[in-house]
Image (cartoon, helix red, strand yellow):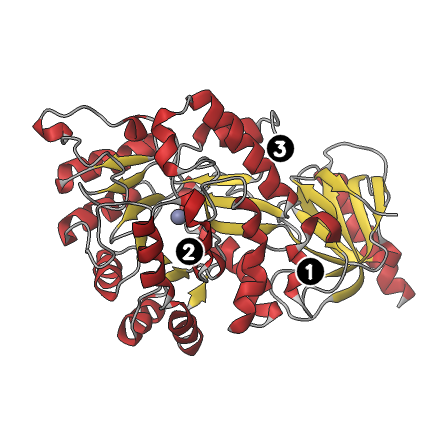
Amino acid sequence: MRILRFVTTALLTTLLATAFCGTTRAADADLVIVHARVFDGRSEKLRDDAAVVIAQSKIVAVVDSAVAPVARERIDAGGRVLLPGLIDAHVHPTIAIAISSLRDTDPNYLAARAAVEARGILLRGFTTIRDMGGPSFGLKQAIDEGLTDGPRIFPSGAIISQTSGHGDLRNRTAESRRFGGAEDPVERLGYGRIADGTDEVLTAVREQLRLGASQIKLAAGGGISSLYDPIDSVQFVEEELRAAVRAASDYGTYVAVHAYTPAAIRRSVEAGVRSIEHAHLIDETTMKLIADRGVYLSPQAYVFSGVFGGASASAGTSAQALKSQQVSVGLDRMMQLAKKYNVKVAFGTDVFGSPKIFPWESREFGARLRWFSSYEILKQATSINGDLLASSGSRNPYGEAKLGVVEPGAWADVLVIDGDPLADVRVLEDADKNLRLIVKNGRIVKRNLQ
Ligand SMILES: [Zn+2]
């Protein structure tokens, strides 16, 4: 045993020396977190008394604490659980105020508000997000450059929508650009892009790719926050959807769609879409289709659990509250079907619209307990989401390492928490109190360990 340990240490030392290209001190890691019970993002069994070894921005080893190498900084997790940084697969940091107010607000104010929400997201333990619509390219750049604290961002850019689709946020009387109307301020700000016909859809997709989109978001059916598209409306004809998928796949990435109804979901899946956002009104045949095709289901439980009725006074109109109810009735059945067909369920919260709503992001954990175990929910928010994000292929902005797992070669995005999230995932709902350590990209963002 002792010999084995010696050999392991020797191997590790070599590994770390290599990682440090020329550094002469043995086992010179930047950060080692010892005495942790590690959830690796995939296995239900925690690894006891482990040490996570970090060099620069990556995890280089996970070893027994007893053989943990010397590091520039050593943190004792004190037997607490260490887990991968969380991933929110559906959130809108740049829609930080009510959608109806976007057009009348100074873009600099919007950017400042988005930065505040991005920091809040990170402090709730989400070290990575998939932005499902909004101009987050600059926010991403500022975070990546270290100008402001926030999660890694997989940006979609503008939500691409047909005229009168979910991403068409113009005033009712506005005229189409095609018929001489002016470009809408919400389009100009990069929140939505209206495109009709395959030519315009191709341009709209390529515009977002040019800006740096890691995946493309289309609205394929009626939505709640948009005023003039009934929930049951099916949006974009087959040719338009296929054109979008083709333009995205030519750039090595995929299309995600907003869709609630079976008709909208089926049309999208048949066109090659890889991620269905929401899907609350799905039926059994369509859920089976998603399972067969290996498409990701990206549902939300908390914001569709009836809370928008109460929040509608600040978040929208009574018509929107009505649409929200129309969709929420499908929640229970959708989740049951997702379980039945063992669909790949992503973890996304869809929070946006006001500083009051963003903290609801953490409530998604508890809301899912009705259908999933704490372990299943944790896996959704870590490794399953990590796999989903990897679908961005060559457009993955963080493609040189893995996300959502704690293993050698993964990004050094980890959390240390009080309580056992595998026994009760709701410990993540009070991040302020329970998250004792947040490390993103190898850098300590929050530390509150004795
Ligand atoms: Zn959304």
Kindly identify the residue that appears in the image at 74 percent across and 53 percent down. Answer: 434
Q: CA distance from mark 1 to mark 3?
A: 23 Å
In the image, residue 109 sits, relative to residue 35, either above or below, namely: above
The three-letter amino acid code for the residue at tag 1 is Val
Residue 325: give its label: none
Whole-percent x and y of residue 100?
A: 35, 36
Q: Nearer the viewer, residue 355 or 33?
A: 355
**Labels 1, 3: front one:** 1
Whole-percent x and y of residue 37?
A: 77, 62
Mark 1 or mark 2: whose residue is earlier in sequence = 2
Mark 1 or mark 3: whose residue is earlier in sequence = 3
Residue 309: give its label: 2
Name the secondary structure under disc 1. helix
Dot 2 beta carbon under 8 Å from ligand 1: no
Residue 254 visible in image: yes
The residue that mark 3 highlights is: 149
Name the secondary structure under disc 3. loop
Mark 2 or mark 3: whose residue is earlier in sequence = 3
**Labels 1, 2: front one:** 2
Q: Looking at the rendering, in which quadrant would you find the N terminus? A: bottom right
> Within the image, what quadrant is residue 288 found in?
bottom left
Dot 1, crowdedness within 10 Å: few (<14), some or many (≥20)? many
Kindly identify the residue that appears in the image at 26 percent across and 61 percent down. Answer: 265
Q: Nearer the viewer, residue 170 or 53?
A: 170
